[in-house]
Image (cartoon, rainbow, N blue to C red):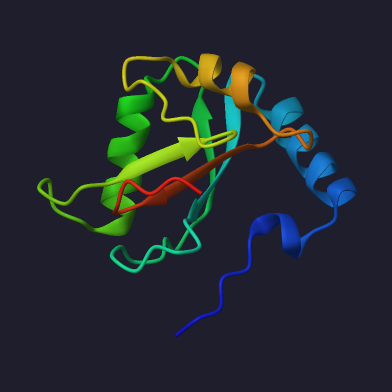
Amino acid sequence: MTTFVSYKNKKTIEERTEEARKMKDRYPNSIPIIVEKGKRDKTLPDIEKSKFLVPHDLQYGKFLYIIRKRLKINDTTAIFTFVGNNVLPMSTENVSNVYRNHKDEDGFLYVTYCGENTFG
């Protein structure tokens, strides 16, 4: 069993800020996103690749589809994703709107996924 270490604990705020800035400078029409499994989730697998760069006009629901494919879970498996302070984004919302409203101070949008609807 692996111990959960969030991306924020792996790098300093300065390193994360610089990395997000470089990504946004190089790809101005894309959003830098970090996807992590919820600390308490025991039902879903760990995601192999946690860093994403997605088009700003992509619908959040389509990004969720990408996450599902990366996790290799079927269509009947429940998955909940949260941003910011445990906010469940609408699937019809553009990723740019979610980013604008919930991005972290370091410039990344942090998305947490879990298989059970547990807040906290």
* Vertical arrangement, residue 80 with respect to residue 41, above or below: above
Q: Quadrant of the N terminus?
A: bottom left
Seen as rendered, the residue at the extreme left is 76
Seen as rendered, the residue at the extreme right is 14
Q: How many marks?
A: 0
Q: Residue at x 32, y 22 (%)?
A: 91
Front residue of 12/113: it is 113
* Vertical arrangement, residue 52 with respect to residue 21, above or below: below
Q: Residue at x 31, y 57 (%)?
A: 71
Query: Going by the image, does 49 lie left or right of 92?
Result: right
Query: Going by the image, does 110 lie left or right of 9?
Result: left
Image coordinates for residue 19, horizontal then vertical, percent: 77, 44
* Vertical arrangement, residue 82 with respect to residue 7, above or below: above
Image coordinates for residue 109, horizontal then vertical, percent: 61, 34
Image coordinates for residue 57, horizontal then vertical, percent: 46, 14
Q: Residue at x 61, y 18 (%)?
A: 101
Front residue of 66/60: it is 60
Query: Going by the image, does 19 lie left or right of 65?
Result: right
* Vertical arrangement, residue 114 with respect to residue 59, above or below: below
Image coordinates for residue 79, horizontal then vertical, percent: 28, 46
Q: Residue at x 31, y 28 (%)?
A: 62
